[in-house]
Amino acid sequence: MIDWQDIRIFSALANAGSLTAAAQNLGLSHTTVGRRVLALEEALKLSLIDRNSPGATLTGDGSAIARLADQMADIVEEIRERSATAQGIGGKVTVAGPPTLLGNFIIPRLAELREAHPELEIIVSTIGGVETEAPQHADLSIRMIRPEQPAHLLRRLGAITFALYAVAEVVAQPRENWTFIGYEGEYTRLAQQRWLADYAGYRPFQFRTSDLPSQLAAARAGLGIALLPSFLADREPSLIPADPGAVPPRRTIWLSTHAPTRRMPATSLVADHLAMAFAADQGFNPPGR
């Protein structure tokens, strides 16, 4: 008997091009993926993978079955969509992203969506670290670095602009006496932090931290000049732009949709809602892009 789950896993392997990528996309172990593909071959009495070639090279039969598997997946999704339309869209969607962007922009917009679709269950997971990958269980991931996972659907949401901010008393000091607030550790590799180091030149960093909220608090406390996201700092009444003529780099915001769930109605609903929310906010769509 042919198991639909085996077909689904084989389809993921065919689309990903390697056992490693397929296992990562599915959230399964290499052993499980290999075992389920072997079970499908035994059920069909066909060789689907050329094991004498590198990667997941498909045989002629494998290519034909992969095309049919994709058609089956489309049919299953149409059935799910019809069911969702009749019953109201619901289900669980996990969204991962940087904590500052999640807390200050994304979560309030998800709350709006949740009110309109009470059947939705939304789980939020934070991504920390410069090169940290999104959790494997995340259906949607918001990143400042373009994700490289195969078979993920990428969408550009907008861009974060940065500017130099401080309290008025600090800005009023002679520029040669300015001191700066910045990142420490791995975060010094960020494009905006490298720009700030060049801008500061000989002038010292007298406060460093590994998170953005601490930099914002330090700027409010008058500890120096900080390079902050405009969407965050512009809402702070105690902070003013320190050098409006400076042009720091912008950071593109990417939305990555996990391959196995990207056709699910609930996942598509949340992804489209977030895309529209970013598009509607001019702060994330600066001129010149």
Image (spheres, rainbow, N blue to C red):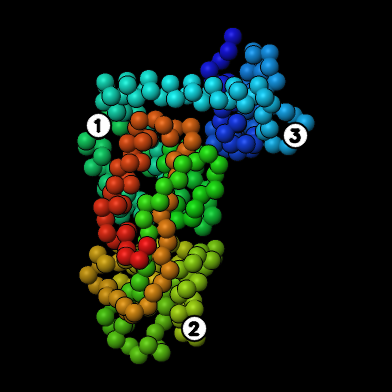
Q: Quadrant of residue 112?
A: top left
User: Label 3 crowding class (10 Å Cα cut-off): few <14, some 14-19, many 20+?
Assistant: few
Residue 201 is marked as: 2
Q: In this rendering, which labeled residue sits more in front, label 3 or label 1?
A: 3
Label 1: which secondary element: loop
**Between 185 and 95, the one nearer to me in the picture:** 95
Tell me: residue 201, above or below residue 8.
below
Spatial distance from mark 1 to mark 2, Cα to Cα?
53 Å
Residue at position x 50%, y 72% in the image = 194
Where residue 192 appears, as percent x and y from the top left, is 45, 68
Q: Earlier in the sequence, mark 1 or mark 2?
A: 1
Label 2: which secondary element: loop
State the residue position of label 1. 118
Left or right for 264, reference 20? left
Residue at position x 42%, y 61% in the image = 251
Q: Amino acid at mark 2?
A: Gly
> Are the residues at dot 3 and dot 1 in contact (C-beta closer than 8 Å)?
no
The count of marks equals 3
**Between 200 and 183, the one nearer to me in the picture:** 200
Q: Is residue 107 visible?
A: no
State the residue position of label 3. 53
Q: Earlier in the sequence, mark 3 or mark 2?
A: 3
Residue at position x 49%, y 41% in the image = 152
User: Label 1 crowding class (10 Å Cα cut-off): few <14, some 14-19, many 20+?
Assistant: few
Spatial distance from mark 3 to mark 1, Cα to Cα?
50 Å
Spatial distance from mark 3 to mark 2, Cα to Cα?
54 Å
Where residue 4 appears, as percent x and y from the top left, is 53, 17
Q: Amino acid at mark 1?
A: Pro
Tell me: residue 206, above or below residue 175.
above
Q: Give the quarter of the figure containing the N terminus.
A: top right
Outermost right residue = 52
